[in-house]
Amino acid sequence: MTYTDRAAAPAILPDRTGVASLLAGIRGVVFRPGDDSYDEVRKVWNGMIDRRPALIVRCAGTADVIACVNLAREQELPIAIRGGGHNVAGSAVCDDGLVVDLTAMNGIEVDPAGRTVRAGPGALWGEFDRETQAFGLATTGGIVTHTGIAGLTLGGGIGWLMRRHGLTCDNLVAADIVLADGQFLHVSDRENPDLLWGLRGGGGNFGIVTAFQYRLHPVGPQVLAGVILHPAERAGEVLRFYRDFIATAPDDLSTIVNLRKAPPAPFLPPHLHGRAVVVIAVCHAGSIEDGERALAPLRGFGEPLIDLIEPKPYTAHQGMFDASVPHGLRYYWKSHYFGPLSDAAIDTLIAHAWQAPSPASYTIMFHLGGALADTGPEAAAFSGRHDGFAININAVWAPPEPDDVAWTREQWDRIHGFSAGVYVNFLDDEPAQRTRAAYSAAAYGRLLEVKRRYDPDNVFRSNHNIDPAVRPGPARR
Ligand SMILES: Cc1cc2nc3c(=O)[nH]c(=O)nc-3n(C[C@H](O)[C@H](O)[C@H](O)COP(=O)(O)OP(=O)(O)OC[C@H]3O[C@@H](n4cnc5c(N)ncnc54)[C@H](O)[C@@H]3O)c2cc1C
């Protein structure tokens, strides 16, 4: 049962008359404590998160979003914004506040001639790719189909196409947004360009985005992609070869390394399940022939346990890792920018990588570089434009299994000396200086200016917060 009696207001809220009049006008669905679906709707991807909002409004359109923002401001309610609900820190939900749930605003409209797409903030990458690939088009998106486009874009957006086509946020050409005072703005290079700069990497700090418009590129539909697995015992030599291989790799080729125990995935033979492995995952965004040439040295190296690189639909590759990170398990992340891969860095990285008690925990490294460097700091707040890696140490477990938090922290501490900064979208619930570490000093200073202009009272603070009251100091680790 949802909250159908819209004239009644939740007792927890201060001004019940104002709340009742808001709820009476809402076109979407309202959930509150006690409703049958409430416990289901307040869940997010990370099963560690257990927050109890006073109200969850599943908005049907921009008018609902404006009404929510006005209500939260007038009633001084904490506000959280939910896109795909994937942020590991659980910032999409808050205790005793209002969750603006955008999941129903998930329309996607492709303009094939103009090579652009307009998408609602509730869309997920699997839905987005399905629509754009119908026209042989795509833009850089997340590598798991059930991640939301909204939070991923606003934090930067790294994925299989980034070394050829830039970050997701580099392809964000316009957006519609509802500000803290309820005002609606269109944002583009010509209209409110300072805000567009902030939306490209500054997260959900400035308002609620109600529509995203992206540039698209011809991709696939068939790409050369997949995984090669090597035994963990050979990790040192495999990673040294990999380091030299990617140094000259074309921008069409993106690679991800995953140090883990092989999951019981249907694409892996049972005898490999649970074996400690180095997974090198690849996607070549150009022609299959160019991909075969580019990948030949990698595929010819050593004695892999299995080589599953093949021509396949881009959408199939995008879904390849979905099952290893399902909704509802317990997750704890710690992350860095990392690199270059010196011998010492490799040895430190692999010394502790397979010691996690849970078979599902892993250390994953996304190779950056390529087209990331084509965009300068004037275009985007995102600050990780170097030829290193975004590394993420992920504890994954399901009670009653013991958690892997201690293993994650230890792995992170060990490699800390080789790192500089962090990708904001990989931050867990961490102290404020970690958000600072996601940006260059110049970018952080400018983010503060944009925040003070568009959200001076910090209405939008259930996020990796740019706190307008704080004076910036040094930080970049
Ligand atoms: C399994 C998994 C795989 C991932 N893979 C990748 C990857 O390949 N590449 C990558 O770059 N990242 C990846 N991430 C990280 C991902 O970018 C972040 O978790 C991101 O926050 C997810 O966005 P969301 O909309 O699903 O999250 P939500 O939890 O819904 O939102 C996170 C935050 O974004 C802000 N936000 C959301 N919607 C809006 C909006 N409409 N307007 C304003 N602010 C908004 C809010 O501050 C909110 O708290 C992955 C995460 C997971 C869990």
Image (spheres, rainbow, N blue to C red):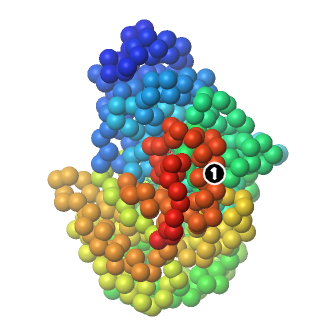
Residue 464: x and y in percent read 47, 52
In which quadrant of the rendered image does the N terminus lie? top left
Residue 165 screen position, x and y as percent: 70, 63
| In this view, 254 is above or below 202 | below
x and y, in percent, of residue 202 in the image: 58, 53
- Going by the image, does 451 lie left or right of 463? right
Q: Closest to the observer: 137 or 331?
A: 331
Using residue 351 as the reference point, say whether residue 156 is left or right of it.
right
Residue at image position (60%, 59%) is 445
Q: Amino acid at mark 1?
A: Glu
Q: Nearer the viewer, residue 310 or 370?
A: 370
Provide residue 103's location: percent of width, then percent of height: 51, 34
Instruction: Kindly indicate the quadrant of the structure image that contains residue 455.
Output: top right
- Please give the name of the residue rendered at 25% of the width and 63% of the height, measured from the top-left corner: 404
Along the viewing direction, whichever of 226 and 391 lies nearer the viewer? 391
- The residue pinned by badge 1 equals 449
- Helix, strand or loop at label 1? It is helix
Q: Residues within 10 Å of mark 1 (few under 14, many from 20)?
A: some
